[in-house]
Amino acid sequence: MKSSPVPFKKIPSIFDIKAGYPAVKGLFFDMDGTLFNTEPIHTRALLQIGEKYNIKPPHPAEVVHHLMVGKADHLLFDMIQHWEGMPKDWEVHDFVREKNKNVVDLIINTPVSDYLYAEMSTLIKNAYEEGFFMALVTSSEKIVTEELLKISGLAPFFHLILTRDDCPKHKPDPWPYLKAIELSNLQSHQIVIFEDSSVGLEAAVSSVSHVIKVEWF
């Protein structure tokens, strides 16, 4: 039975999770806007493409950011491909390659503390040490995911990582979360999913797991 996401204004501790969800044995995290405050980095990466190719967004930067949040890159490409100045011969893979190059460059040159909160790092490490099954389920590509996890030092704490490259269907389809549940050998009622965007929340709720709506960024 589907349940409504529970909003959290601040990052919970492992004690909060154990008290609120005593039967839970697995924590599944979205990445951008949930684990990391990287949505602004994705916006900057897109705007850098605009500067390089003289593409003119029909909206100010803050509106572009709002429209981007939670969108997988193929949906983002659908949104921007008719913007003034977009190269006419570009296909989605051309855009994704250019954007991800910018994202990785920005990640490398941005202090980790700007996008990873200490409370989140503590939650991840404590949950792992407490024996929770830890999964990362993201619509970002593998190249960006691996760079973020490496630089942040969080890679060793995840038992399972599913990126856009690993999934034939993407959020809001529940396939990524259903596959993660299958691979975890847990039941949906034993899992808490952390999500922030409307498409991510739709996918999480459809998996019939417990869902925390992230509101701390």
Image (cartoon, grey):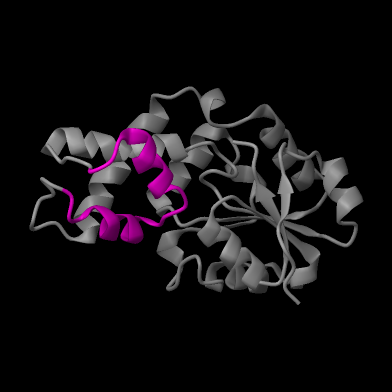
Q: Residue at x 35, y 55 (%)?
A: 73
- Residue drawn at x 58%, y 50% is 196
Where does residue 133 sit, x and y in percent of width and height?
Answer: 73, 57
The reply, left or right, for residue 89 in relation to residue 130 is left
Residue 107 in view (yes/no): yes
The quarter of the picture where residue 99 lies is top left
Q: Answer with left or right where residue 127 lies relative to residue 82.
A: right
Question: Which residue: 59% across, 43% down?
Answer: 35
Which quadrant: the C terminus? top right
Q: How many marks?
A: 0
Rendering coords of residue 25 (x, y %):
81, 60
Q: Tell me, yes or no, whether the highlighted magenta stretch contains residue 66.
A: yes
Residue 53: name its quadrant.
top left
Q: Nearer the viewer, residue 198 or 111?
A: 198
Q: Which residues are magenta?
A: 58-83
Q: From the viewer's perspective, is residue 41 above or below residue 200?
A: above
User: Considering only vertical position in the picture, is 164 above or below 34?
Assistant: below
Q: Main secondary structure of the magenta part?
A: helix
Between 26 and 80, the one lying in front of the other is: 80
Q: Position of residue 28 (x, y in %)?
A: 66, 56
Q: Position of residue 186 (x, y in %)?
A: 75, 70
Query: Is residue 186 visible to the viewer in this orientation of the structure?
Result: no
Q: Quadrant of the N terminus?
A: bottom right
Residue 48's image quarter?
top left
Residue 203 highlighted magenta (yes or no):
no
Rendered residue at 42%/55% (across/down) = 71
Q: Residue furthest bottom?
A: 1
